[in-house]
Image (cartoon, coloured by chain):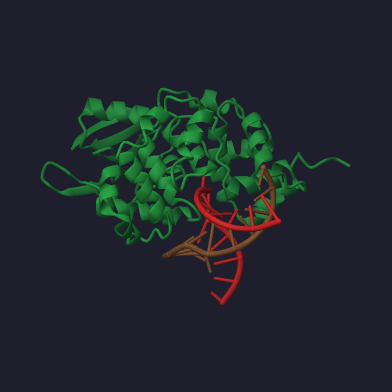
Chain colours: A green, B red, C brown
Amino acid sequence: MNSFNLRASDLDLALTLGSGQVFHWRCPDRVQWEGCLGMHFFRLARRAPSTLSVHTTAGPAMARSLLRNYFGLNHSLRSIVKTFPSDPLMQASLQANVGLRLLAQDAWVALACFILSSTKQIIQIRQMVQAISQAFGAEVTDQSGQLLDHSFPTPGSLARAGESALRACRMGYRARFLHQTACLIDQGKFDLVKVGQLALPEAREALMQLPGVGPKIADCVLLFGYGFQSAFPLDVWMIRILRDYYFPGQSPSVKALQAFANDYFGRHAGYAQQYLFDHVRALDASTWKKLVSDSPFIPSS
DNA sequence: CCCCAGGTAGCCA
DNA sequence: TGGCTACATGGG
């Protein structure tokens, strides 16, 4: 394997790779993070405040390029978070997640993972992703043939696997959705590349044509897989956060929340969303209750 | 045993 | 359009 250091400021591996935006990275020892990008294996760790140590099966030049793109290292995190609103919850989310970056994931990987995500806890999504990778992904080995990891399965491999084989990976009703979507892409009946060339509303409509993809999963794929940073996925957590904190006692519709979120959180709304999601999800119920009771959005009498 | 999980599709009024 | 509800499985 190749080893080198990579300059990476404003990047916290645990916050970024352990967050709810990605599901295939492992951290066996609380220090090193292991996973694949395409067919290349990576082992990453923090070496110094602005430096990562990298071990990889990829060539150094290729590896640097892949990592810089994946972690968005050519974007200034400071300038992005400056566009976030200044309310107390948003600022607390920022302080608790310094170094959380949005990843530039492969569109297919994001699509497949979020089809699996519906009504599942994040730990279970990770288990399903690991299961399909081991069953249908390619083996990634070092030069001595030692098995390092399995790559994420291609649409073709999932299409050929069949629905029942997917179901054996304990994904329940999601097996049919994932298999049908994999078949459409494998047969060229749905073009993931074309989606990325559309404007956001059209790209969203296109993704929602796929089985198992509704508005929420479409927004996740747009945000995490296509770099549409204004896409704002509304899952049960974000709906709760927006209703409880930003509209206390009002319970607006999801449609109304969507309109509010895209306006209020600015150009990088989806980025802000990830900070709120990870922050509130880590709080215990009583802390959240206190935050809500101190919301500046409670109408003054 | 309960309730819930980064939802969606199908059905009904 | 908006409001149910089934869907599989596992964590807490």
Marks counted in the figure total 0
Q: Is A174 left or right of A41, judged from the image as shown?
A: right
Judge whether residue A198 can be spotted in this image.
yes
Q: Quadrant of residue A107?
A: top left
* Residue situated in front as seen by the camera: A55 or A206: A206
- Is residue A202 rendered to the left or right of residue A4? right
* A43 vs A223, nearest the viewer: A223
Which residue shows up at 42% across the image and 55% down it? Answer: A174
Q: Position of residue A245 (x, y in %)?
A: 70, 44
Query: Is residue A7 placed above or below A174 in the rendered structure?
Result: above
Q: Position of residue A4 (x, y in %)?
A: 25, 31
What is the residue that sits farthest to the left in this orientation? A144
In the displayed orientation, state which residue is furthest to the right. Answer: A301
Check the picture and name the quadrant holding the C terminus of chain A.
top right
A51 above or below A181? above
Question: In terms of depth relative to the viewer, which is nearer, A40 or A183?
Answer: A183
Is there any visible trace of residue A32 in the rendered image? no
Between residue A43 and residue A269, name the one nearer to us. A269
Q: Quadrant of residue A104?
A: top left
- For residue A196, side relative to residue A34 (left or right): right
Is residue A149 shown above or below A285?
A: above
Q: Position of residue A34 (x, y in %)?
A: 30, 45
Q: Residue at x 57, y 38 (%)?
A: A273
Residue at x 37%, y 55% (from the top left corner) = A128
Q: Residue B8: horizontal and vertical position, in percent?
A: 51, 48
**Which quadrant of the rendered structure holds the N terminus of chain A?**
top left
Q: Is residue C12 left or right of A260 when viewed as pictured?
A: left
